[in-house]
Amino acid sequence: MVLPLPLVPFESYMLADDRPAYPMNSFIRLRFSGRFDRIALDTAMSTAVSRHPLLAAVAHRSGRQWVWRPVDGLPTIQWLDALPAESLPSLKPLDVRLTSGMRVAVCEGPGQSDIVLQVHHACCDGLGMFAFARDLLVAYAIARGAAPATSLRPLAPEQLRARGRFGLTTGRLVKMVPNHLAGLLGARQFLMRTPEPLVPHQPSDDDSPLPPDYPASWTRGLELTESKGLVAAARQQGVSTNDLLVRDFFLALNDWQQRHTPQRDRQWLRLTVPMNLRTVADRRLPAGNVVSMVFLDRNPRQMMDPQRLLESIRQEMQLIKRLQLGLTFVLSLQMCGWLPGGLGRMTRARRCMATSVLTNVGPVLAHCPLPYEEGRLVVGDAVLQSIDALAPLRPLTCAAVVLMVYAGRFQITLHYDSRVLTATDAGALIDDFTARVRLSAVPRQPLVGIHP
């Protein structure tokens, strides 16, 4: 038994940032044609969750420290009395102080099924959620009598004890001190600038109820040829695909904001961009948080030339990777946690921390030991057609985008705060972003203003 385990700084941060009006809950929806055998899926759930201790744990306070302890009984599947629909089913937020930080819910309709994973971000990040999803589907295939070669990959739960160290020794940290001086300059910039929310508004009180349509979202997708074109266009310009996506999202945010609430040239837009910190040594790690965040600031004046904007993003992201500045945020959290109430004061500050969030998960469920049909995963009698993923929202950050590649196609999902944005306005934002991404997928195509 690997539990109990103390929470690492990033987990403590997500716990401190959690509140009823802005729960730190993430979602993945797996959309299938076909239906599931309930007994086999319940069996697969028990198998999969037993492999990921933090998804069957509760955060317990022990003195000044929070500790993960096992829950009484493993989480089970909730079979909802609701048909699959464009919107996600309405699910109550998870409070990891009272119950396990994971819920799996299923909606069934004629010839179709949706499996929804809901996870508290204190338990694991997006890649951890997809690791669990993979195990759930493989375990289901095994329960349904899959070929003998089908097996679950080996995991090493004991590696969770080192999940907050990121493979760093004292010697390596000392060698990185010059690098993190640059990170501290970035932290100073983070504190000195106050980014603009997408829409000027007062955040809801921490204890106020969620809107009835929580979680509200829109999803768009690129075709296979467009997805291949985006990768080729990035290669042609000597940038990463992520650089292009960040550039296009900045332009979409700026264009949307200028149309709705024109701002002065020197007011800042800030993107929170999560960074995966996993190494080869973590390949057997169960679901957990091995992630940090970087923050990219731009003002309208810096976005007048899309090509110069792209080059500035490329240079900044290369610097972050070369100096390993993704570690700066989690190391800052550790120092903040040493101060009594430090994380609480940080998360309860009544100021905008970021205009929006952009998470690029990359290819998902790409190497399952299961058959594929036209690039899509076949699980028993069901075929996984598409995937949605939603990142959590926090006060004054009313929009978050998650991108991933499934079956060779980019999927784009916007999670929005319906207390601030109407469904029409949120739809216009994701349509503008998607249009820009499609345009970027055409090599050497000049960029022009786009108005949906």
Image (cartoon, rainbow, N blue to C red):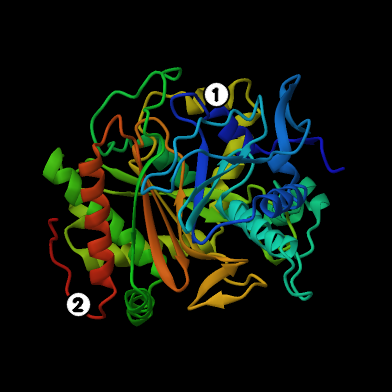
Q: CA distance from mark 2 to mark 1?
A: 47 Å
Secondary structure at badge 2 equals loop
Residue drawn at x 68%, y 40% is 76
Place of residue 179 in the rendered image (x, y in percent of width and height, measured from the top left): 56, 55
The circle drawn on residue 312 is none
Looking at this view, is 359 or 23 the one in front? Answer: 23
Q: Nearer the viewer, mark 2 or mark 1?
A: 2
Asked which quadrant contains residue 398, the reply is top left
Quadrant containing the C terminus is: bottom left
219 displayed left or right of 363: left
User: Mark 2, residues whose alpha carbon is within 10 Å: few (<14), some, or many (≥20)?
Assistant: few
Place of residue 135 in the rendered image (x, y in percent of width and height, measured from the top left): 68, 58
Give, as a three-letter code, the residue at label 2. Gln
55 displayed left or right of 324: right
87 displayed left or right of 117: left
Place of residue 210 in the rendered image (x, y in percent of width and height, measured from the top left): 41, 26
Residue drawn at x 24%, y 35% is 199
Label 2 sits on residue: 445
Label 1 sits on residue: 344
Place of residue 180 in the rendered image (x, y in percent of width and height, measured from the top left): 56, 50
Residue drawn at x 71%, y 59% is 139
User: Mark 1, residues whose alpha carbon is within 10 Å: few (<14), some, or many (≥20)?
Assistant: some
Quadrant containing the N terminus is: top right
Give, as a three-letter code, the residue at label 1. Gly
Asked which quadrant contains residue 242, the reply is bottom left
Are the two marked residues, 2 and 1, in contact with CB atoms closer than 8 angstroms? no
Looking at this view, is 33 or 11 the one in front? Answer: 33
Question: Across the whole image, how many numbered discs are drawn on residues?
Answer: 2
Residue drawn at x 57%, y 25% is 342
Asked which quadrant contains residue 302, the reply is bottom left
